[in-house]
Image (cartoon, rainbow, N blue to C red):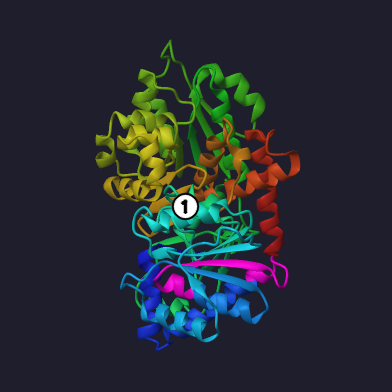
Amino acid sequence: MKRIVNSEEMKFCDSNTIEHFGVPSIVLMERAALCVVAETVKRIPAAGRVLIVCGGGNNGADGLAAARLLYERGYSVAVVQTADNGRRTKENLLQRDILKNYGINITEQIPQQQTFDCVIDALLGVGMNGAPRDIYKRLIRQMNAIRAFRVAVDMPSGVSADDGKAYDPSFDAHLTVTFAYRKAGQLLYPGREKCGTVVTAAIGITDESWLERRPSCFAPEPEDLNRIPKRPPRSNKGTFGRVLVIAGSTNMAGAALFCAQAAYMAGCGLVRLFTPESNRVILQSALPEAILTTYDETQKKVPLQELLAEAITWADVIALGPGLGRSDDACRIVEQVLLTARGPVVADADALNILAGKQELFKKTAATLIVTPHLGEMSGLCGKSVPDIQGSLRSTAEQFAAQHRVICVLKDAVTITAGPSGVRLNTSGCSAMAKGGSGDVLTGIIAALTAQGMEPETAAYIGVYVHGLAGEVTAEQIGSYSVLARDLLQAVGTIFHKLAEESK
């Protein structure tokens, strides 16, 4: 997994590299500047005109060093730096003196009568604290107004490295050259859009710089799919787990179908559907592989409580909620499952809507609970507005997971999985997946991976990653407008087939 850092963690690693390991700050700075220049010259023709706008901190010092290196390569450089307010770092002062020794002029105003091929933003970097003020606002707006290729050094000015919040104004980069590790704000929206293409450059800050500290956030990558349990030759359907899908209501059979089929496509050995009798014909026709247990919503031939108790006992993992509705029966089902289940439960959709009004169940349940809310469902669960949640996606998921002792999969364009071992930011997926039924597929995948023996927290973030990959595969095949939940199911099968072939 890739380590994803916030501003405090990046400063921690930078400081340890300098103070604990003895790498001079100026060496790191030179390497950072070399990386910025290397990426810039790939995109800007030789002898091009480059504007570098620098602040008084070490991000500005990186920019000053980059100006010198570009000058050495024959580029025409114009260097602008904010006025000295007594806060320039010693590295910044050193880089400024070096430029002066080379005869490179430094001004405080962006030239108004010149055109540029490239603008490099080295104003604030990851150390920004709050919205840009005064001169910084003016310089950011002026940089954005120039018709040129725009490069950000480490982080676009005006964008938070911690949560991706983009202040007004913030630098609109085509390319961001970041150092050592990706920053959380480069993955989360709207900061993700402000960064453009992100290149992570190695400058000498390594994993050793964490010393005894553990990173708080990671992003899954293709190698993490190897965490999915292998399928031994000597096995049977019981080897790969039993998933009980409690889903569907009258006119909502599709949610139950997508969830159950996804569990099978993700490798589960047995899937049992617990659903109203009105869904019997549809589900038996669409997924004859599933075991079907139905309850009668009107005649009550067999008490619902007895049917459900037997089904809960049968299951290794329960997927609870897709299309379940909020009827009295649905409320009783959710309550009985959470009060009596002892294994993992993946709660989604209407189970979450019911939980929002019965939050005492979080304390009473003995199940390992994975909740998978979208923004609207999370709003009901935590009491925040959707815009507030969007502005604090990571902290909302972390706080909810800690408060209720659950694994929280907070679904958005970048899905956050928060649990006991930290946070995972998902980097797979695309807008093609923004369709009804997509979340039901995810619930089935997570339940299936858990049933096959994965730790529930691992199953949650790997399931999210697989789900996103399925969306990418499907969008590539049929386009981003036309993807349906049923298409994701086939792509899940393709991903698992490829994984099995690569493991041979």
In this image, 60 relative to 398: left or right? right
Residue density around tag 1, few if under 14, some if 14–19, many if 20 or more, within 10 Å = many
Q: Residue furthest front?
A: 113
Determine the image quadrant of residue 55.
bottom left
Residue 47 on the magenta segment: yes
In this image, 148 relative to 167: left or right? right
- Residue type, label 1: Ser
Can residue 452 be seen here? no
Determine the image quadrant of residue 500.
bottom right
Determine the image quadrant of residue 184.
bottom left
Observer-nearest residue: 455 or 465? 465
Q: Residue furthest right?
A: 477
Observer-nearest residue: 149 or 336? 149
Percent position of residue 56, x then y: 39, 71
Please tell me which residue is depicted at 38% across the width and 65% down the height of the picture.
127
The quadrant of the picture occupied by the C terminus is bottom right
Percent position of residue 46, x then y: 72, 72
